[in-house]
Each structure stands twice: as C-alpha cells, then as structure tokens.
C-alpha cells in the first residue's frame, strides 16, 4: 500500500499547520481526498497552482490518492507563461487559490481550505499513461512546456529512501523553506507524509523575522535549503540563533561552496544537530545521494554516497566505467526513482518508461578512496579556452569565496568566458584573481557588471537570462 492512499491510518495526528494557526489532521486529509475523488470521478490532468498552504498540500496528496495527475506550477507564475502551458496540455481541471478565481472563471466543483477546483472547457483531452503520477516543470521561470514525468513507483521509492537515510519518524516537524512545486520542496512533503509527521507551512522568506518566529513558536525540528539559502543564513547570523528544537537541516539544489559546507558542519557538530548535504535532480524524482551527518565535517565538499536502493557509476569519455579514486567522469545513476522521461506536449502524456531506471546526470564527478562522491561541475559547464579546460562552476565558487560582498555567475563559449559580478568595485581584483589561479590568457575572459544575478524561485542561477 502506498503512503498517499493510506495516510488515514495516522488518525487525528496533525498533518499540516499553517502560519495563521489553521490545522488539518491526517483523518481530515483522507476525508477531503475522498470528497475530491467524488467531485472528479475520472482519471485526468489537473493544473495545481501551488503555495505553502494547507489547501495546496492537501490537494496534492488527494490527487495522488485518487490517481489524478497534477502538474505543479507556482501560484505566482507569470500569466503569459501559465496560459502557454494551459494551451499546450489542455488540463481537465485547475486547482487554485481562491484569489485566482477571477482570473480563471470556470465552474467551481469543490472549495476547501482557501482553494477551489474548477472544471475547464478544453475540447482536447490527452490520454494518460497508467504509470504517470505527477508532472513537474523543468524550468518554472521560463514557462518551457518541457515537463518531467514521474510515476507512482518513483515517488514511493524515493520517499522511502529519504525516510531511511534521514531516520524520519512521526515526531518530525519540518518547516517549509522551499516551494512545493520544486522537486526538493515536494520531496519533504512526500517523505514526511510517509511517517505521519506534522508539517509546518509558511510562505514567509527565511530571512524574515516572521519565519523564525513561526519556526520557534511551533518547535520546528528541521528545514531544507539550496546553496543560496545557506549563503543567506550565514549573513543573518544563523550560527548565533537559539534553536533548541532544531534537529536537522539539509541542503540540495546545487553544490554548496566547500568552505560554507565546512562552517555549517562545524556548527552542527558543536550544537549536536545533524547537517545533511544531498544530491538530486527532478529527473530522479528528488534524491540520488546524501552525505551522512556524521561525515559532514570529515568529508565537507562531498555530496556523499548513493541513497538506499540506488547505484552510482562513473563513466569516462569512451563510456568505460571508472573504478579508480579521484578520476573525473560523468555520473550515471540507476534506481527505481529514475523518472519515466520528459513530456513536451499533451500527446507525450501517454508515453511509458523511456529511461529504464537509468539516468545520465550530466554532472561530472569523482570518487575518493572511501567511496564518497564529489561533484566537480556540469558536463555542459566546461569551456576549452586557449587549449585549457575550464570548469565554469569552479570559477563561480572561486570568485564568491574570495569576495563575500558580491554574487557571481560565469558563462561563455570556447572563444570567450564571461564572468558576471554584482560589485563593480571588485572588477579589477576579479580579473587578477582569475589570472593568478588559472593562468589563463587575459584575452580568454572578461568581467561584466550586472545589478543582480538572475535566479529562479529555488535560488538556481538562470544562465540564459544573463546579458548576451
């Protein structure tokens, strides 16, 4: 039996508590799921406009319960981008916050918890593959119609693996720091719903006083963050906070700068908390690797080892396996959480499993002598400048580590590397740093000034949005 059709077993235990004090028990959640199932009798596609609130979270789990397929989008998605997705996929229903009802004046079939389910009038209804459980966007900020197709097995297996390696149980009280339409944020809901934990839902940013008041008042035991989250936490003096109920904090969504990794690992060791760095992609449902908390300091800079039930393989340029330590190759992952494939139009929703449990991650990595993996960059984020192979991700980390009062993102081609920074006062120093550390010919790169580095809602850099 799957967790998303058996959560009623947790009875009156609180499933969700949101910032206005409203709560929903697991028994109430199951009752709502049954009510939604009666309102939508057929298996179909629904667009779910997400925010960290009870209505959104209850809707998501209820869709899984009833084998209804949700496409998760941010409730604040640009209107033009949303309409483009609607035109491409023709969903049978929309599930949205009540404040968006005027924008989508369709017949309302169900309203609960500040959310409403409305029936659309699209003439085209695309058939759905029986394995298809969930659709997530590959780029929520650009409105690309390219979606990741996740199966029920993908979701269940990854949630079980996360529960095992994080040692989750019903006493957990995670607080939301990430949007639930983002695979990392959704994995927190999936894994904690599996064990009957109480999830604390807030839309407040992690840098706000309101967030920390909500977290402390409701005795949150954990939170997750992307690298940008941890950069912000250091700036707001997280290390000085009194957080007696906090047990665990996790990081994924990109490589954390090794020095920052070390600082948070030291804090965790000093305070008796668990800091777990993780590795994953939407194409693998969420998680593929994790660094056990007791190795956080010893192996700082590493993303760890493979999750329970998975397998890592390193491949060289000729697709031969790499078994020696400290040799860089492309990381390949195998496991039940590898998703079915992509969809780029409504007709693709009938497609089955195109990956067979194997994912070429596109990440370049190496393994140390103890079997711990280190991501060194994206396969597509390497340039060959004047005969020198340059890792753009390493350039970004190097600059940000040297200058804490600027943000940095590098891009370019084999003719010219462009390094974008947000503080003009350091332009010459950055030029000198690159030359000193890489010995590149100064004609191979340039430093450009921008007001800010464009990022999506999860804090990932949008390289395509940098000036050309």
Image (tube, grey):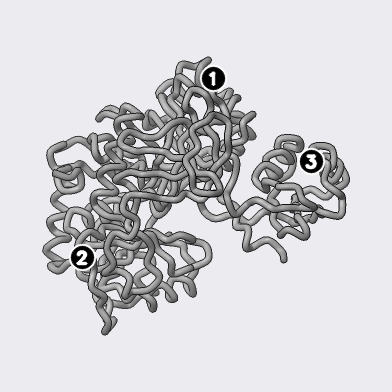
* Residue for point 86% across, 42% down: 432
Mark number, residue 438: 3
* Residue for point 63% across, 52% down: 381
One can see residue 72 in this view: no
How many marks the image carries: the answer is: 3
Quadrant position of the C terminus in the picture:
bottom right
- Mark 1 or 3: in front is 3
How far from the left and from the top, in percent, is residue 455? 59, 54
Which sits earlier in the primary sequence, circle 1 or circle 2?
2
Tell which of 41 and 386 is nearer to you: 386
Q: CA distance from mark 1 to mark 3?
A: 27 Å
**Please, what secondary structure does the residue beneath circle 1 have?**
loop
**Please, what secondary structure does the residue beneath circle 2 have?**
strand
The residue where tag 2 is placed is 110
Quadrant position of the N terminus in the picture:
top left
Taking the image as shown, residue 189 lies to the left or right of residue 65, namely right
How far from the left and from the top, in percent, is residue 57? 30, 51
- Mark 3 or 2: in front is 3
* Residue for point 54% across, 24% down: 299
Q: Is residue 220 above or below residue 416?
A: above
Residue 355: quadrant of the picture: bottom left
Taking the image as shown, residue 456 lies to the left or right of residue 180, namely right
Badge 3 density bin: few <14, some 14–19, many ≥20, Cα 10 Å: few
Mark number, residue 298: 1
* Residue for point 59% across, 25% down: 262
Which sits earlier in the primary sequence, circle 1 or circle 3?
1
Q: Is residue 109 above or below residue 29?
A: below
How far from the left and from the top, in percent, is residue 225? 49, 39
Tell which of 104 and 426 is nearer to you: 426
**Please, what secondary structure does the residue beneath circle 3 have?**
helix
């Amino acid at each position: 039996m799957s967790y998303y059709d058996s959560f009623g077993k947790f009875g009156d235990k609180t499933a969700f508590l949101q910032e206005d004090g409203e709560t929903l028990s697991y028994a109430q959640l199951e009752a709502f799921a049954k009510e939604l199932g009666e309102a939508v009798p057929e298996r179909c596609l629904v667009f779910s406009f997400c925010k960290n609130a009870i209505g959104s979270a209850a809707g998501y789990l209820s869709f899984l319960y009833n084998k209804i397929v949700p496409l998760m989008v941010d409730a604040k998605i640009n209107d033009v981008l949303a309409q483009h997705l609607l035109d491409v996929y023709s969903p049978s229903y929309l599930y949205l916050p009540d404040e968006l009802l005027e924008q989508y004046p369709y017949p309302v079939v169900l309203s609960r918890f500040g959310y409403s389910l409305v029936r659309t009038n699209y003439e085209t209804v695309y058939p759905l593959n029986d394995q298809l459980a969930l659709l997530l966007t590959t780029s929520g900020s650009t409105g690309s119609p390219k979606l990741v197709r996740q199966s029920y097995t993908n979701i269940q297996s990854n949630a079980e693996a996360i529960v095992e390696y994080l040692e989750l149980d019903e006493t957990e009280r995670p607080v939301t720091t990430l949007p639930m339409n983002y695979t990392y944020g959704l994995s927190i809901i999936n894994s904690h719903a599996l064990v009957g934990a109480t999830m604390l839902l807030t839309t407040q940013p992690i840098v706000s006083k309101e967030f920390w008041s909500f977290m402390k008042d409701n005795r949150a035991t954990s939170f997750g963050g992307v690298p940008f989250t941890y950069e912000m936490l250091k700036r707001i003096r997280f290390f000085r906070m009194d957080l007696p109920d906090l047990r665990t904090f996790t990081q994924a969504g990109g490589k954390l700068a090794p020095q920052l990794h070390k600082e948070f690992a030291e804090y965790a060791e000093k305070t008796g908390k668990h800091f777990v760095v993780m590795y994953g992609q939407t194409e693998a449902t969420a998680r593929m690797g994790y660094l056990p908390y007791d190795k956080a300091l010893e192996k700082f800079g590493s993303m760890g080892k493979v999750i329970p039930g998975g397998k890592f393989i390193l491949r060289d340029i000729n697709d031969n396996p790499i078994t020696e330590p400290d040799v860089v190759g492309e990381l390949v992952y195998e496991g039940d959480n590898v998703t079915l494939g992509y969809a780029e139009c409504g007709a693709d929703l009938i497609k089955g499993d195109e990956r067979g449990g194997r994912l070429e991650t596109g990440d370049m990595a190496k393994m140390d002598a103890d079997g711990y993996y280190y991501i060194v960059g994206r396969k597509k984020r390497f340039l060959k400048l004047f005969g020198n192979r340059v890792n753009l991700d390493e350039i970004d980390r190097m600059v940000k580590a040297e200058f804490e009062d600027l943000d940095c993102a590098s891009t370019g081609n084999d003719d010219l590397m462009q390094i974008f920074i947000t503080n003009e006062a350091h332009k010459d120093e950055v030029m000198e740093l690159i030359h000193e550390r890489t010995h590149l010919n100064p004609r191979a790169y340039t430093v450009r000034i921008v007001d800010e580095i464009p990022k999506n809602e999860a804090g990932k850099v949008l390289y395509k949005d940098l000036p050309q």
